[in-house]
Amino acid sequence: MGRYILRRAAQGLFVLWAAFTIAFFVLYLLPSDPAALAAGAGGEVADVDPALLDDLRARYGLDRPVLVQYVDALGGAVRLDFGPSYQSGAPAASLVAAAVPQTLLLTGVALALAVVGGVVLAVASVLPRSRALRQVLSALPPLGVALPTFFIGLVLLQWLSFRAGLLPAIGNVGWQSLVLPAVTLAIPPGAQLAQVLSRSLRGTLGEPYVETARAKGAGRLRVQLGHALRNAAIPAFTMLGVMVGALLGGAVVTETVFSRVGLGRLTVQSVNAQDVPVVLAVVVLSALVFVVTTLVVDLLYPLLDPRIERASTPRTVAA
Amino acid sequence: MTQLQEDAAARTAGDATPPTPVLEVTGLEVGYRTRDGEVYRAVRGVDLAVQPGEVVALVGESGSGKSTTAHAALHLLARGGRVTGGRIRLAGRDVSDLTDREWQDVRGREVGLVPQDPTVSLNPVQRVGDQVAEVLVIHGLARRREARRRAVGLLGQAGIPDPAARARQYPHQLSGGMRQRVLIAVAIAADPRLVVADEPTSALDVTVQRRILDHLEHLVRERGTALLLITHDLGVAADRADRIVVLEHGVVVEQGTAAEVLGTPRHPYTRQLIAAAPSLASGRLVAPAPPTAPTASAVAAPRASAATPAAPAAVPPAAPVLELVDVRKAFPLPRGGDRREVVAVDGVSLRVERGRTYALVGESGSGKSTTARLALHLERPTSGSVRFRGEDVTGVRGEALRRLRRGFQVVYQSPYASLDPRFTVEQVVAEPLQAYGIGTRAERAERVRALLHDVALPADALRRSPRELSGGQRQRVAIARALALRPDLVVLDEPVSALDVSVQAQILELLVRLQAEHDLTYLFISHDLAVVRQVADEVGVLHRGRLVEHGPADRILLDPQQAYTRELVAAIPGRRYAAPAAHPSAAPPATAVPHPTEEVR
């Protein structure tokens, strides 16, 4: 087990390095000039005093060869020092760290809503005796997948905030302000989960061991929740890692639509301003989240499915 | 346990006067809704009764409705299936109109089911002890903790050694036979009056099959439980049943005591089944007398002369077609396990002479399929050598191997999986000819027609898809494909084990006839000794990768020397009525119907 985690951690480090490197060179190749942006000239070099630009370039080390900049940035990233933000001058890492709690709250609530909603919808789409009801319920997940996040967000805003005035439309204050963005963010991944799980459940219900359970005298609920759901959850569980990534991506749009402070909005601002240190910090953080989630999912697999054994797990001695 | 016995005793006493059948089915009709909205009548007016403590075998081929009848007795029909008529009574109580909720109390409690394939019939993510305990919990016979304790006892009764430890294991940690014992424990847990066993051992090896059936029979006899045994294997029915019910196309054609049905079968279908059932007593099939008129292929040969591969004239006649010399095949295991590698074939030597059939028998995991793959150059031996037509071909690769492959062809076990469903029959059979660029388009078409005629398929099968053919017809197509290149060696890997007995007999007859007509050499892989008896000249018995015994078929099968071979021979079902069963089929059936036609299903 220890060796397995060590190997996976090494793989994770490689992913982090690759994400950092690709992001660095993509940002470097962008056409506009960060120094000009920092000087507040919208990237138009001509309008700014060349001495000021040189000064800014020297301050951020932008006048050095790209490889030197890269090695320097990589060395800093290892110490979680991504350098000062071009825009505010504050350390990029602390800007990101300040934005994390709000986004963590939003995505955490959205993840919980997506998982609970997805599982409930999937089970509901196979449980009823009525064929018509099952078909109506099975049609909901594809609909949820098809609707884009911003569209759901705008519709919810229109109805619940502007017309009914039930919930605040924007801001970060109180739990009420969390409801609309979290629901908006949860719908696409939740629907996707429901789709995968309900298909998997329908397949599982045709398995011979389900017939064995029915032959024991088990009722519908026991068959579907006690026998089918856990088996059907195995493929759906794989989606969890992907879902966390989708939630982070979705947070960018959701935070913009609902004018929330958070990582998503910070990312949008930093990319627009080509604030390389902040963007790099965000990229590394997202990659880290991905690496950790997939590792956790893989470590939880054997708990869900006893057939999966880690090769390095000490085996029970055969009698 | 004592309580259970008292229950059973009380029940038997209650049923003593008048004897109420445990299961009574009258005029049962079951229909399946097909995709085009029509109803397929799978069971048509079946009458059937099982008395307390009786073992009744329901025998028939696939599509006969035997499984449907059994599932109707548990109200467990597959999707689209519906009982459209007749009554079902359990211990005198009419259960035909029970609601789904009421059926839940009947299933498991009054009728237990032992399903067909133990490898897929247990929940893979639940401990087996819990799966047995669940029956007791569902029917309120015990609370969870008490149920778990009793589950251990039930596993022990089902013949599982060290049941307390096994109860905590997951299904994938148990062998197929052990899993079937777990399912038997599930079926008997609530002490039902009737156990329905649906082909309980057809997925298991013969020796395991015998032990499981022995144990199941012992359990039901001891408890006074009735057993409805569904089987396609007349031998199993003969060995186990008090009474036998024969089903054909959803209709009961004959029923009576086992001795009556097997000894003096009245219905032609029963006689046909008995004649088709292979047994050691039936002897090797003999090809019909050489036809006086030239065969279809002989007629076709001159025209398809370009298609004829060069005759292996350079080979001295004494050289065996295939010779394996001390071949060993080891597969590496993933790191971290207890062992580095698993040895599938361990020093096997054999010779297959031209025009003869060498049968390789063994149970699953014995290495017989790996040996076949070594012979076909689909695997390379770890050590040892493979000689083909007298030449050492162990290391041949690339284009030379491709040319060599023309000399050996294969027929696989499942004709459902081995034919590309997107091809027509003509394309399937012509593919090897195309692959080697043999003949012109017209010559190939001619050769394909001749081959189809050879395997007794109608000419109109050419344009059809394999999907439209029955299992037996598909296997004929696979045989035609294997013969297309006129190979020196045909490897037959369990060629009839996926087929019904009567179809199985026809395919075996076909193989024997083709061998005589074309001087074919067969390497025949099988787990079924009775089948081997019908075709083999030489037999090799594989056990854990080693050839434990080999020699002429008569000697190996009738006078086995090794303990393992003797165990295999003893495990062949159908010994109880072996003499009468063999009687009508003693004459080689191949002579009777040289070109048997098959019914399309």
Image (tube, rainbow, N blue to C red):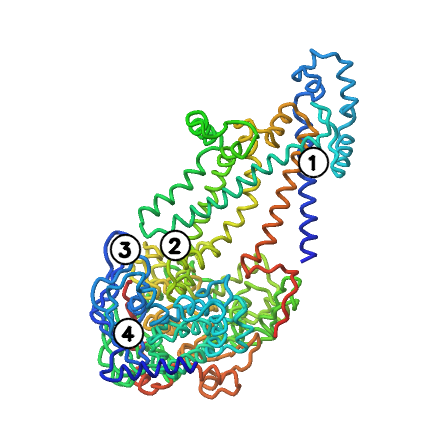
Viewer-closest of A121 and B598: A121
Q: Position of residue B501 (x, y in %)?
A: 34, 73
Distance from Cα at disc 2 to Cα at disc 4: 30 Å
Identify the residue under disc 2: B421
Task: Name the front one of labels 4 and 1.
Answer: 1
- Vertical position of residue A157 compared to residue B232: above or below: above
Distance from Cα at disc 3 to Cα at disc 1: 59 Å
Viewer-closest of A120 and B410: A120
Distance from Cα at disc 1 to Cα at disc 2: 49 Å
Task: Name the front one of labels 1 and 2.
Answer: 1
Q: Please state which amino acid type lies under the numbered disc 2.
A: Pro
Identify the residue under disc 3: B34
Quadrant holding the C terminus of chain B = bottom left
- Badge 2 density bin: few <14, some 14–19, many ≥20, Cα 10 Å: some
Identify the residue under disc 4: B593
Q: Position of residue B242 (x, y in %)?
A: 31, 83
- Badge 4 density bin: few <14, some 14–19, many ≥20, Cα 10 Å: few
Please tell me whether mark 2 sits on a helix, a strand or a loop.
Answer: loop
| Residues indicated by labels 4 and 1 sit on the same polypeptide chain | no
